[in-house]
Every structure is written in C-alpha cells, then in structure tokens.
C-alpha cells in the first residue's frame, strides 16, 4: 500500500514534501517522495491524502487507560485529596468494566493520533483490550500495598505473564510499577526493581509528584502520611528527597520516572543520569494543583523526555498535542522539532520501544497518523502549534486502518455502552465513599 500526502515527517529525518510511505504487511517498507515510490512499486494500492501531513503514530508515555471511565467524575482538587478517592472507585470496577474502560481509552488515544502508550495496568484487561483496538505499548502492571516478599504471589493473582520476556514481546510489552514511594514500602520498591532487572522489562514509578510527597519522604508527616501507613509496608521516614530516596533503594537506575515535579536543582543531574527517562504530565499536575516540573533544567541535564496525559481521572482528555502545548508554554525553549521528538521517538526510547515505534523508518511498525494541515510550508511547526484530535484524518497501526475520515474504522457501540455502565458504577462508588476512609 502506498500512502501519499503533502508532507511526510519521518522524525528520523527532515520532512519530505510530496512524500509517500510504502507499507508492506504490518511494517514500513520505504519512505520517499511520491514520484520515487510510485515508480518503485507502480502496482501498490494507493491512498492519497491531499492537504495532509503524515507523522509516526504518537507515543503517549504515561496513561492509565483502565481509569478512562473516571473522566469527569473527580473534579480538580489538591493531589492528596484526589488520590484518596481513587482506590475505592477502582475497586468498584470489575474485569469487564476495566476492559471497557481501557477500550474507550484506546479509542480516544487513536482518535488523537497516538498508537503507542506507556500504560499503568491493574491486570491483563488493559493490555488485552488496548491491543485489540490496535494500540501498542509498554504495560506496567501496578503492585502496591504489600511487602516485597509477597510480590510474586500478587503477580500470579493479577495474571502477570509468567515468562515476561517471551510473552511480552511484539507490540504489547510488559513492565511493572510499584506506583509510588508512599504506596509501596522499601522492600516492595526493591523487589519490583529486582524482578524487572531479572526479566529485562520496564520499571515505571510516580515520583516527586506533589508537595505532600516531598513532606512525607523528608519528615514523615503531612496529608499522605495516612496513605503511607496503610499501603507502604515497613515505611520509615527516609529524611531525604523523593529522588534520593529511590536512588538509595537502587530503584532510580533505569526507571521511567513519571511526573518529577518537585526535584530540587541538586537532584537533577542524579535523575538525568540514573533514570531511563522522565515523563512529564503537565495538565494532570495543573488539575491536581501539584506544581510545575523544572522541565528545562531536567532537559538541559540530558534526560530523555517523554510526555503523558496521565489518566482521564486527572485530565480533561487524552489529546497529546494539547498536552505538548502546555509543556512548551512552561518550557518555551522546546522547539517544535524537539516537541515532536518528545511525543514520538524520544517517548518510544523512554519506554524501550524505539526498535519498532516512534519514527517512520523501513522495518518499523506501520504506525502512522495523518493530520489535516492544508497548505502548510512549516509542517512541524504548524502541527505542534495547531494540531489536535480535531485535525485527525486517519490513523493506521500495524498496517491496519483504525481511523478513517476522522472516525473509528471499527464498530464502537458496544464498547461505549459498556464504558457508560462502568462509569455509572464508579460514580456510585464515589458518591458512597468518604475519601479519608476509602483510601
Ligand atoms: Zn499516573
């Protein structure tokens, strides 16, 4: 199949005017100009997209697709008040609800041009449902609230794949996440880190997200102390910063460090050198009044950067281009070109997926987003400044059309109905719960 457009932006090279992509099966065969590729394979079925710009499928490096049904249910508030609502609400959702929620989230990702996620999963539902929809990604199984010695038992209960390197190859890869230093104690943080090293899979952790977390790790006090006493088994006040605490446990090296809002200048070189990458979620941080990450400083220290929308429970949508504009507003030195890299190849590197995703190159997966951008001479700048889910014309993943003419190319009625039921259940659980006792 030959896809053509006014511009093809491979990310791995400069934009190509009157560009084309030759797709064979589920991978990209070649990139070039329309003239060159039409000559090379004159019999290829052709799909022309005049007035459009083609990019790789975007990489949303931090999501919780299973929480999509919580969208709009928990209003903006302080982080520590918000998080008290979440566990009881999640518990109200059964496996079918989680699958419906993850499917609805996957559709939203595709409708806004993302085909790859770094997702926090609560069991096998999100990876399965998201894969069915056509998303790829690293799915970090979340474990918290237990001692390190109970990790393997818990993973069995949660249907974590028994031999992750074998069963988590291809488009849906596995990882683990101990959530955070206030919901996982030191033995669990260490155990999760050890197991991910042993299996060579990804390790993601929410770190330095709120002032309350900083206070807890430094002084053992504050609004997260109650949560820590319930969930972070054997937690003893470390008396340092969150980044140094993780480092002292050997859990910073190779980590996908999510949020990193409250990182003092003295910790930034350590974070940049040790973590696999830093994923910012600026709109979630604003929603929860958590502060603004020192993005420019962390970037200047040489960290790999990814960008995530976080979940619908703390954001208004999963539109990654809108997220990027908020990131750039807070860190204006990010050029449009770097911005595009952050939501494509750099995000893929953070998630350990750049062998197959994040750029348009021969041999990589045919994950392709097509944006309506008529008469542009600056396709990267215009996409970054103006693009959004509203500009999506078509999305392909693994060589299959998922979105055509701005609409899903598969039926979504049952998914939306199931997600609606799950949302009603979650709303009822939220109504009946008192935050302080439900956490
Ligand atoms: Zn998160």
Image (cartoon, rainbow, N blue to C red):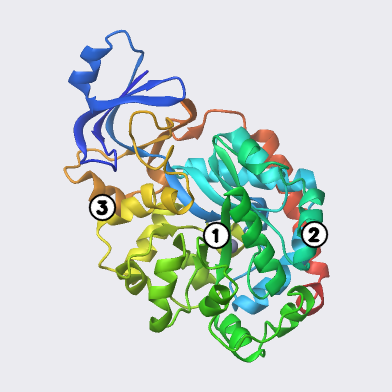
Q: Which residue is mark 1?
A: 310
Label 1 neighbour load within 10 Å: few <14, some 14-19, many 20+: many
Question: Marks 1 and 2: CB-CB under 8 Å?
Answer: no
Percent of width and height locating residue 7: 24, 35
Q: Which numbered dot is residue 113?
A: none
Label 3 neighbour load within 10 Å: few <14, some 14-19, many 20+: few
Label 2 neighbour load within 10 Å: few <14, some 14-19, many 20+: few
Q: Residue furthest top?
A: 43
Q: Is residue 162 rendered to the left or right of residue 251?
A: right
Tell me which residue sits at (51%, 76%) in the image. Answer: 243
Q: Nearer the viewer, residue 36 or 275?
A: 275
- Vertical comparison of 78 with 66: above or below: below
Percent of width and height locating residue 333: 25, 67
Q: Which numbered disc, 2 or 3, marks the residue that appears first in the sequence? A: 2
Q: Which residue is mark 2?
A: 91
Q: Which residue is mark 3?
A: 337
Tell me which residue sits at (66%, 34%) in the image. Answer: 413
Q: Residue furthest front?
A: 198
- Vertical comparison of 225 with 404: above or below: below
Q: Is residue 140 visible?
A: yes
- How far is disc 2 from disc 3 in space, using C-alphas? 42 Å
Mark 2 lies on a secondary structure that is helix
Q: Is mark 3 within 8 Å of ligand 1?
A: no
Tell me which residue sits at (75%, 47%) in the image. Answer: 97
Q: Nearer the viewer, residue 44 or 141?
A: 141
- How far is disc 1 from disc 3 in space, using C-alphas? 23 Å
- Name which quarter of the figure residue 295 lies in: bottom left
């Amino acid at each position: 199949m030959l896809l053509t457009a006014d511009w093809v932006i491979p990310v791995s090279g400069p934009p190509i005017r009157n560009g084309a992509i030759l797709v064979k099966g589920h991978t990209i065969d070649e990139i070039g100009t329309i003239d060159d590729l039409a000559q090379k394979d004159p019999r290829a079925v052709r799909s022309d997209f005049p007035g459009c710009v083609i990019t790789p499928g975007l990489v949303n490096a931090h999501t919780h697709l299973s929480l999509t049904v919580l969208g709009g249910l928990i209003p903006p508030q302080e982080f520590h008040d918000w998080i008290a609502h979440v566990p009881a609400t999640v518990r109200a959702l059964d496996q079918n609800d989680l699958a419906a929620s993850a499917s609805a989230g996957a559709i939203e990702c595709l409708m806004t041009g993302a085909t790859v996620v770094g997702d926090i999963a609560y069991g096998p539902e999100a990876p399965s449902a998201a894969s069915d929809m056509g998303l790829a990604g690293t799915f970090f199984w979340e474990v918290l609230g237990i001692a390190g010695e109970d990790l393997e038992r818990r993973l069995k209960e949660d249907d974590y794949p028994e031999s992750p390197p074998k069963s988590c190859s291809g488009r849906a890869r596995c990882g683990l996440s101990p959530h955070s230093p206030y919901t996982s104690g030191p033995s669990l943080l260490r155990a999760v880190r050890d197991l991910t090293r042993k299996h060579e899979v990804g390790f993601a952790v929410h770190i330095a997200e709120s002032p309350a977390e900083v206070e807890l790790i430094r002084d053992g006090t504050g609004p997260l102390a109650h949560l820590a006493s319930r969930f972070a088994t054997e937690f003893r006040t470390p008396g340092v910063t969150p980044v140094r605490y993780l480092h002292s446990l050997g859990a910073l090296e190779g980590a996908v460090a999510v949020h990193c809002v409250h990182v003092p200048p003295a910790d930034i070189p350590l974070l940049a050198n040790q973590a696999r990458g830093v994923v910012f979620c600026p709109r979630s941080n604003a929603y929860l009044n958590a502060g603004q990450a020192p993005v420019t400083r962390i970037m200047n220290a040489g960290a790999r950067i990814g960008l995530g929308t976080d979940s619908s429970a703390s954001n208004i949508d999963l539109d990654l281009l809108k997220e990027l504009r908020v990131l750039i507003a807070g860190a204006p030195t990010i050029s449009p070109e770097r911005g595009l890299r952050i939501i494509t190849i750099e995000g893929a590197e953070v998630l350990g997926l750049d062998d197959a995703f994040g750029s348009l190159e021969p041999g990589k997966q045919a994950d392709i987003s097509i944006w309506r951008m008529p008469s542009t001479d600056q396709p990267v700048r215009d996409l970054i400044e103006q693009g959004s889910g509203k500009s999506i014309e078509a999305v392909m993943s693994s060589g299959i059309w998922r979105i055509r003419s701005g609409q899903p190319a598969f039926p979504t009625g049952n998914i939306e109905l199931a997600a609606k039921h799950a949302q009603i259940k979650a709303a009822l659980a939220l109504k009946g719960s008192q935050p302080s006792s439900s956490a």
